[in-house]
Amino acid sequence: MSNRIQKSALISVFNKDGIEKIANKLASLKIKILSTGGTEKYLNSLGIKTEKVEDLTNYPSIFGGRVKTLHPKIFGGILFRRDCDNDVAERHNLGLPEIDYVIVDLYPFEETVNSSKSHQEIIEKIDIGGISLIRAAAKNYKDVVCISSIEQYEQFLIDLDQNKGNFSLSKRKEYAINSFKLSSNYDNQINNYLQNGKLEKRTKLRYGENPHQEGYFNGNLDSIFEKISGKDLSYNNLLDIDAAYNLMLEFWDDIPTFAILKHNNACGIASRKNIKDAYLDALSGDPVSAFGGVLISNSEINKETANEIKNLFCEVVMAPKFDNYAIKILKEKKNRIILNIKRKKFNDKIVRTCLNGTLIQDKDYITDKVDDLKYVTETRPSKVELTDLIFASKICKHTKSNTIVLVKNLQLLSSGTGQTSRVDALNQAIEKAKKFNFNLDGSVMASDAFFPFPDCVEIANKSGIKSVIQPGGSIKDHLTVEFCNNNDMSMVMTGNRHFKH
Amino acid sequence: MSNRIQKSALISVFNKDGIEKIANKLASLKIKILSTGGTEKYLNSLGIKTEKVEDLTNYPSIFGGRVKTLHPKIFGGILFRRDCDNDVAERHNLGLPEIDYVIVDLYPFEETVNSSKSHQEIIEKIDIGGISLIRAAAKNYKDVVCISSIEQYEQFLIDLDQNKGNFSLSKRKEYAINSFKLSSNYDNQINNYLQNGKLEKRTKLRYGENPHQEGYFNGNLDSIFEKISGKDLSYNNLLDIDAAYNLMLEFWDDIPTFAILKHNNACGIASRKNIKDAYLDALSGDPVSAFGGVLISNSEINKETANEIKNLFCEVVMAPKFDNYAIKILKEKKNRIILNIKRKKFNDKIVRTCLNGTLIQDKDYITDKVDDLKYVTETRPSKVELTDLIFASKICKHTKSNTIVLVKNLQLLSSGTGQTSRVDALNQAIEKAKKFNFNLDGSVMASDAFFPFPDCVEIANKSGIKSVIQPGGSIKDHLTVEFCNNNDMSMVMTGNRHFKH
């Protein structure tokens, strides 16, 4: 592709910073400047000669500026194909200008939202003409240079200087790519604003998962919780809060329930008649891991509970309500983050980076229920066991795979988490439960995926585990069921795998 | 806000399907139809009366249709504010139409790319006028109904029928929101195409992490590997492949290295003089977990290695090269996925859904190197230990937190993964190494984060672990160092935490 000497430029900008230099440079290269309204006045006031777009189009700026540049003479001057004889002739016959540079900016939508006093003011500032000019110039990048942001001025000046207005095709394409990125983001923000009544906020975090990684959060946390006290939320706090929140949504309508999480996994959870007991029994699940953990409750945290919590070093305490004494007690540690959470479901779709792209999936929306269970063993679980099985299954769903969860009397005894082998997960859970002096007799076990072999029920049986909940679906399910039948164990199948990575 | 009876409609569509019904319904409501080029001809051929846009603007369609509707009369007719006396008067004086419905579609960019034979054809189809009309109508949703996609026709017909052309403000806003979503996506696709020469491909996966979840992958995998054989990649395959790929990039320039992963964590990895030995020693790290695993090599897989691999049931085998015999052997299992991988780094930024928003961070880009280590103990690690320490640290970085990794002689002996407590992670690793008959004497240990207490080095010492690599940075580092000094252990600090969740 040949390089091209450009002949005239259209300048129409909100932000006048830096435009003087650009205009002077263009003028020194004998490039004619077309301009509109405020830009024209500004350039003329600096003694820079411009041609008025309205004089070209013979059409006034109307509706208080809502329609200014949307005219075929202007768009024709940008879009005609310089290497197409018909286009060139047509342009000539219709007396259209040749516009070789388009320098147009968009008033940043975020600033629009922040600085405007009313919805109507914000709507008024949605750019129609400018973005159309940018898109037209970017479409015709083969012939036109499109500068759509003040951030490009420095490079543009250097390029103008070095090449006397002559730009390579790859350079023009680069500018075009940036222009479509800009217009896409602009409309995404408008969509966002119209849908939610505000913009998605971008919050810079202290850092990402580790101090050498930059991190950001995009979203409006204030719609799901109110921060009462504590230091700024970190990337890892947010990951833990997310895990805690989603876990607790499973127990929202249950009796008082308290959970403690570390590294996105529950290390303790219990349902009790009152929230203080629920906290204490969650804590006893693994008091070592609880150190520095994230705490969440489905019920109001009262003074008695706060008096227990204050003895634990923990990063975050979340609950739908706190009484005033509790807040006072918990606030004593200045860094401790206290969040008043609302009951909200969010994000039906889950997105994550993978390889050179993105994985998108539905959230795991199934909660296993007693009515949906398939009873596959001769022995049926007792009523108490059934309640424990569902409790265990809910925890399992929110624990990293492979996982085995052990529960007794609505208390998490232990779990094996994030294991490469299911047997390891079970052994780990058993070891851990013993370490914290739990008696596994009469406990129940949940598995996030089916058992490919009967090895897990064999190990479970030796430890006193009496009942099992699992998806089922292995071709060797019958071996596992047979073992349960021979050893007076009960088992139910859900049909629902709950991998979580 | 008052409901509004609409008086005229602009219809300009690529896809004529369903437009007859819409036009007839509008006509039956005495709504005047304005139309352009092909749409006008089509409607007239059906006997539906329309007014020609060119007759209104007195301006021809130019440059082979590149500029058709970009005229102030049209945009003015859409954008004037019906509740603003000045706008109403101005419209009247200039003889502009009142356009109350805008029915315009965009030729889907994906189809454009798929059906076009040349880059220039694709550029030609980038829509300028249509998208401007849609954006103008959506901006003025207070007064205008904007239908921008065939998928809205059914609802639009129902609404027209029920309300005789009268739409509520919230209904018009809903259409506007969809319009800005459409334009944002459209420009995002153009940006994508210009940047990469192709569109990001959206591949529907069999399902997400679990069968009840829908799953998709957005991206072009063919630029990072060639699939030689095997079944379709699943969501969980992709997650594992991502983990394997990123892990192996750490060893790309090393001697032959082989890794086996399960649930995104390495369960075996070894560097050896030849790739067969590397495979066998990776496998011996945990032959149980390896079942159904994802295998990756930094070197060509030859016949001898393939003859070993074929005995293992595994989901995926990845390598930068396979000899012909190896491919033949590995292909024997039809489902086994064989990927020829290229050396590519991808995605500097990592995105994941969190709460009601998105977390964005830099990828963990630091690989710990011998030259950057801080020697903090009286005993220094030997040369062999140093090599093992770096090897262990690389694995640690790619294993889920909390993690402890044990290595001897460039072989992963075991790891504790995804634990809520660091002590648990270490105990788990020690148990696992013993289970597979490894002798820990002289092994080294890596930890993804610092040791808050000296408990881990105490346990390590009892097991014969001689050297430790960890970030450092705890206020109690001196206790850990002191213990090492008293027990003839060496320790190096990297300054780099490697959490990965």
Image (tube, coloured by chain):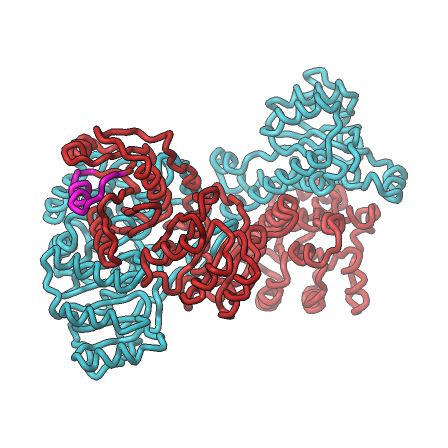
Chain colours: A cyan, B red
Q: Position of residue A216 (x, y in %)?
A: 41, 39
Report the residue that reaches farthest toward the bottom: A378
Instruction: Locate residue B375, reporting x and y percent.
Output: 28, 29
Q: Residue at x 63, y 42 (%)?
A: A180
Q: Is residue B14 above or below residue B256?
A: below
Of residues B321 and A438, the one nearer the viewer is B321
Residue B51 image-quadrant placement: bottom right
Q: Residue, x 26% and y 64% (percent of image)?
A: A423
Q: Which residues are magenta?
A: B452-468
Picture residue at 60% right of the left edge, 62% below the top: B152
Q: Nearer the viewer, residue B456 or A400?
A: B456
Tell me the quarter of the image containing the N terminus of chain A: top right
**In this rendering, position of residue A210 left or right of residue B179:** left
Question: Residue B463 magenta-drawn?
Answer: yes
Residue shown at 43%/41% (left/top)? B363
Percent x, y of residue A394: 27, 63
Q: Is residue B269 among what the camera can see?
A: yes
Residue B374 belongs to magenta span: no
Question: How many numbered discs, if any?
Answer: 0
Residue B476 can be seen, yes or no: no
